[in-house]
Image (spheres, helix red, strand yellow):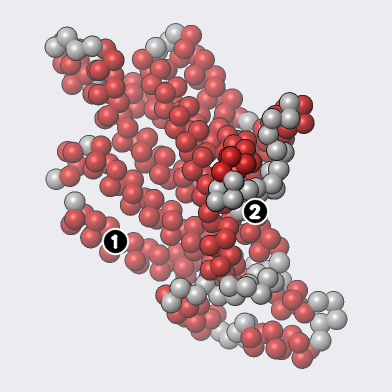
Amino acid sequence: MLAFLSRRLLQIVPTIILVSMLIFGLQQLLPGDPALIMAGEERDPAVLQQIREQYRLNDPVPVRYLFWMKGVLQGDLGESMRLKSSVASLVAEKLPVTLQLAAMALLFALGIGIPAGIVSAVKKETAWDYGANLFALWGLSTPNFWLGILMIFLFSVTLGWLPASGYVRLGEDWRQSLATTIMPAFVLGNALAAVLMRHTRSAMLQAMGADYVRTARAKGLQEGRVVLKHALRNAMTPVITLGALEFGTLLSGAVLTEQVFTIPGFGKLIVDAVFNRDYAVVQGVVLVTSTIYIMLNLAADVAYMLVNPRLRG
């Protein structure tokens, strides 16, 4: 296990460096001049020159990249041109919001998708199976923004059970925090639950037809034990991978949901930064998101070994 982790960590370092180069390089392809946006309508040449010197916009791209990476290695992601605050502080402020939203969405997805997939596989070609597949089709076909608006109309406007928008931090009032995030979390987790259901069903059907399951049944073990202890444990390997990767997707793909529910998370931060040509914020947010995604891949590999001991050798 230790040797495997060492090899994977050595692979992660060049991967993050390559990702950082891509982030910085692609950022330069965005149209527009951030100095012109910051200078305002008058655009005094002296002010433009000062802005370009302050943010090194006149330097060659490789020089700016090396200067940026030096700051990243020291924990400095740069300064927001528009907000005049450090990118690291913005990330520290916005990341917990999206992490909470993504974690709740993943809990919804796991709590709905995996049981539905198990039932669908065990009750193959029955009403339970058809119902689970219908749910998966609905989850995959429903746009997040439409479902969000529908839930706001039903639970906020009509029933008055939940707030329509806004966000309260867990540390301030955990009940109100859950109330403001439960709808957007369900909207985000809805499609993922459908995907998890289909993958769990497929993996379970394959496991249920394996020799070790037939042997367990021949020994007279109860069906519930055969399904949960033998089939499910082996079927969880691809589902773990999907869950880990999709958690990273939730972090970077919550833009529409955060906009609909007016949640000040990562999605809104990066959208505002792109529109305002705030290079440092875009680079910092994407780099942090990419690093989290890479670490989630590592976590998935470790989880493989914990679930399936045969992979430890």
Q: Quadrant of the C terminus?
A: top left
Is residue 19 or residue 283 the one in the foreground?
283
Within-10-Å neighbours for mark 1: few <14, some 14–19, many 20+: some
Quadrant hosting residue 245:
top left
Within-10-Å neighbours for mark 2: few <14, some 14–19, many 20+: some
Q: Amino acid at mark 2?
A: Pro
Task: Give the residue furthest to the right.
Answer: 42
Mark 2 and mark 1 lie on one chain; the one further toward the N terminus is 1
Query: Label 2: which residue?
Result: 264
Mark nearer the viewer, 2 or 1: 2
Identify the residue at image location x=51%, y=40%.
Answer: 104
Please determine whether, in this image, residue 48 is positioned above or below residue 275.
below
How far apart, in angstroms, are the residues tagged by discs 2 and 1? Answer: 33 Å
Please give the label number shown on residue 9: 1
Q: Secondary structure at mark 1?
A: helix
Q: Position of residue 186 (x, y in %)?
A: 58, 34
Please determine whether, in this image, residue 107 is positioned above or below residue 100.
above
Identify the residue at image location x=29%, y=15%.
Answer: 224
Q: Is residue 308 left or right of residue 152?
A: left
Is residue 152 or residue 43 the one in the foreground?
152
Residue 256 appearing in the image: no
Please determine whether, in this image, residue 208 is positioned above or below residue 285.
above
Q: Position of residue 68 (x, y in %)?
A: 50, 77
Q: Is residue 192 left or right of residue 57?
A: left
Asked whether disc 2 touches disc 1, contact meaning CB atoms under 8 Å apart, the reply is no
Residue 183 appearing in the image: yes
Please determine whether, in this image, residue 294 is positioned above or below residue 204.
below
Quadrant hosting residue 273:
bottom right
Q: Position of residue 199 (x, y in %)?
A: 41, 30
